[in-house]
Image (cartoon, helix red, strand yellow):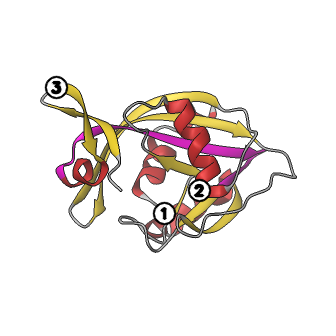
C-alpha cells in the first residue's frame, strides 16, 4: 500500500510516497510521541519487519502523517495502531527538525511535531507485532545511561531527541 506523506520538493509541500521520501532524503513531516508515567517513558522496540531501523529501541511511537492528516490525529491514530493505546490526552511539546541516516541508503530528514501524554499505572498496552516487538517503561536517567552505553541499540532520532532537544521536549536537559 502506497502511503503518501507531506514532503518538500523544490520548495513546495507535495504528497510523496513514504519510502521515496526516505530514499531521496527529502525533508518531510513526522510525529513522535512520548507516553510518560512520572519520570518513566514508555519505549518500544521496533519490529524486525520494519524497512529501516528494525529491532532498535525508540520512543513510544513515531510515524508520518498522511497527506490530509493533522499531526495530532496522526499521533492518536498511531498510538492505537502500534500499541493499542487509546484515551490519552496528547499535549504538543515541541516542533523540531533533524536529519539522520537510518541505513539502507535512507535518510530521515524530518520536521517533527513531538507530543507528550501522561499515563496512569493501569495503561493497557497491546503491541501490534507487525510494528513492535517489545515495550518497556524506562526511567529517564536509566534511558540516558543505556543510550550512552549502547547507542547502537537505539534509533538515531531518539539519540538526537535526548542529546539536542530534551529540555524543549521534557522541560529538563
**Which residue lies most toward the left here?**
10
Residue 100 visible in the picture: no
- Report the Cα–Cα distance between label 1 and label 3: 32 Å
Q: Where in the figure is residue 100, as x and y percent of width and height?
A: 31, 51
Q: Residues within 10 Å of mark 3 (few under 14, many from 20)?
A: few
Residue 108 at x, y = what percent?
31, 49
| SS for callout 3 | loop
Q: Quadrant of the N terminus?
A: bottom left
Residue that carries the numbered disc 1 in the rendered image: 154
* Front residue of this view, candidates 143 and 66: 66
Q: In this rendering, does residue 134 appear at all? A: yes
Dot 2 or dot 1, earlier in sequence: 2
Q: How far apart are marks 2 and 3 (CA)?
A: 32 Å
- Mark 2 neighbour class, 10 Å CA radius: few under 14, some 14 to 19, many 20 or more: many
Residue underneath mark 2:
82
What segment carries the magenta color? 24-42
Which residue is drawn at the image coordinates 42% and 50% (left, top)?
157
Q: In this view, does 161 lie above or below 47?
A: above
Q: Residue at x 44, y 72 (%)?
A: 49
Whole-number angstrom distance, CA of label 2 to CA of label 1: 18 Å
User: Which quarter of the figure has residue 173?
Assistant: top right
Q: Are marks 2 and 1 in contact (CB under 8 Å)?
A: no
Query: On residue 55, which mark appears?
Result: none
Q: Which of marks 2 and 3 is nearer the N terminus?
A: 3
Magenta span has 129?
no
Judging by the rendered image, the residue that carries numbered circle 3 is 11
Amino acid at each position: 500500500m502506497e502511503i503518501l506523506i507531506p514532503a518538500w520538493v523544490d520548495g513546495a509541500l507535495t504528497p510523496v510516497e513514504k519510502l521515496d521520501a526516505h530514499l531521496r532524503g527529502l525533508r518531510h513531516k513526522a510525529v513522535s510521541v512520548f507516553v510518560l508515567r512520572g519520570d518513566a517513558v514508555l519505549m518500544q522496540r521496533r519490529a524486525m519487519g520494519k524497512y529501516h531501523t528494525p529491532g532498535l529501541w525508540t520512543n513510544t511511537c513515531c510515524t508520518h502523517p498522511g497527506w490530509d492528516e493533522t499531526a495530532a490525529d496522526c499521533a492518536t491514530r498511531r498510538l492505537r495502531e502500534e500499541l493499542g493505546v487509546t484515551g490519552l490526552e496528547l499535549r504538543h511539546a515541541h516542533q523540531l527538525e533533524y536529519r539522520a541516516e537510518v541505513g539502507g541508503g535512507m535518510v530521515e530528514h524530518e520536521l517533527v511535531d513531538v507530543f507528550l501524554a501522561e499515563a496512569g499505572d493501569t495503561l493497557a498496552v497491546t503491541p501490534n507485532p507487525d510494528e513492535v516487538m517489545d515495550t518497556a517503561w524506562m526511567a529517564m536517567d536509566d534511558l540516558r545511561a543505556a543510550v550512552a552505553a549502547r547507542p547502537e541499540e537505539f534509533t538515531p532520532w531518539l539519540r538526537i531527541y535526548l542529546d539536542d532537544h530534551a529540555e524543549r521536549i521534557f522541560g529538563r536537559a
